[in-house]
Image (spheres, rainbow, N blue to C red):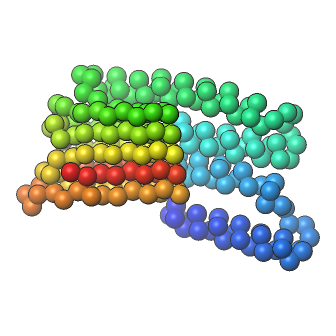
Amino acid sequence: MSTRSIIGIIVIIIGIQLLLTATGVEGIPSFGDWWPVIFVIMGILSWRSNPRMFIWPMVLIIVGVVFLLENYEVLPGSSWDYIWPGIVILIGLSFLVGKSWKSRQDPGGSGQNVSAVFGGRNEKVIGEFSRGSTTATFGGTQMDLRGANIADNAEIDAYASFGGIEIIVPRDVHVRLKITPIFGGSENKTNPDAGAKKTLTVSGTALFGGIEVKN
């Protein structure tokens, strides 16, 4: 089942629940109690679309679980007492994972891993390029590949959460966009030359954010 279908089913279930509550049907759980499940589902869908980009989907899952436990009075105190430390830990992990990924995929420092958290970053990639990643969380990134020698069937993992990603590619490359939009969007604005033979695949998730690829 596609992500779009799953989101559609979730919206229908919410509508039915609200309708039954409005008509006074008893025994229906209040939407105010179980709404955090939506965050958990979005996190799972985001992780499912790109398992390599797991840090920020985990943030959504943790936030949803903590709010859910608070609503059912399982956790003492405020939910934010648990959420903020968890987010701080995951942000630290994201930098460690990003550094490890960059050291494996980009030993020459050509900018094949571009990440921004609560800020912005523009990076020009040079040299050989076969795989990279870019993450924008509450911020924006730009990955400029016009100076790179892009290999055929190259791949980019992209994850935009409450932020935006812009990827610029030369005209000798066809772009295949495989983005899962969750309350977000993606757009392929490239116009490759007639003789373009190489293919670049951009896959990932746009969660309350946007991903754009252009020349």
Which residue corresponds to the image point at 59% horizontal and 52% vertical from the top-left? 42
Left or right side of 172 for 137: right
Question: Residue most toward the right?
Answer: 26
Residue closer to the observer: 22 or 63: 22
| Residue 197 drawn at (x, y percent) | 13, 54
Q: Quadrant of residue 147?
A: top left
> Is residue 102 positioned above or below 22 on the image?
above
Which residue corresponds to the image point at 17% horizontal and 31% vertical from the top-left? 127
| Residue 79 drawn at (x, y percent) | 77, 37
Q: Quadrant of residue 33?
A: bottom right
Question: Residue most toward the bottom?
Answer: 23
Q: Can residue 153 be seen in this snapshot?
A: no
Q: Can residue 163 be seen in this snapshot?
A: yes
Which residue corresponds to the image point at 86% horizontal and 66% vertical from the top-left? 28
Left or right side of 213 for 148: left
Residue closer to the observer: 51 or 118: 118
Q: Quadrant of residue 20?
A: bottom right
> Is residue 111 positioned above or below 47 on the image?
above
| Residue 108 drawn at (x, y percent) | 24, 22
Give the total number of marks visible in the rendering.
0
Which residue corresponds to the image point at 48% horizontal and 56% vertical from the top-left? 184
Left or right side of 10 for 30: right
Question: Residue most toward the left?
Answer: 195
| Residue 165 drawn at (x, y percent) | 38, 45
> Is residue 2 positioned above or below 40 on the image?
below
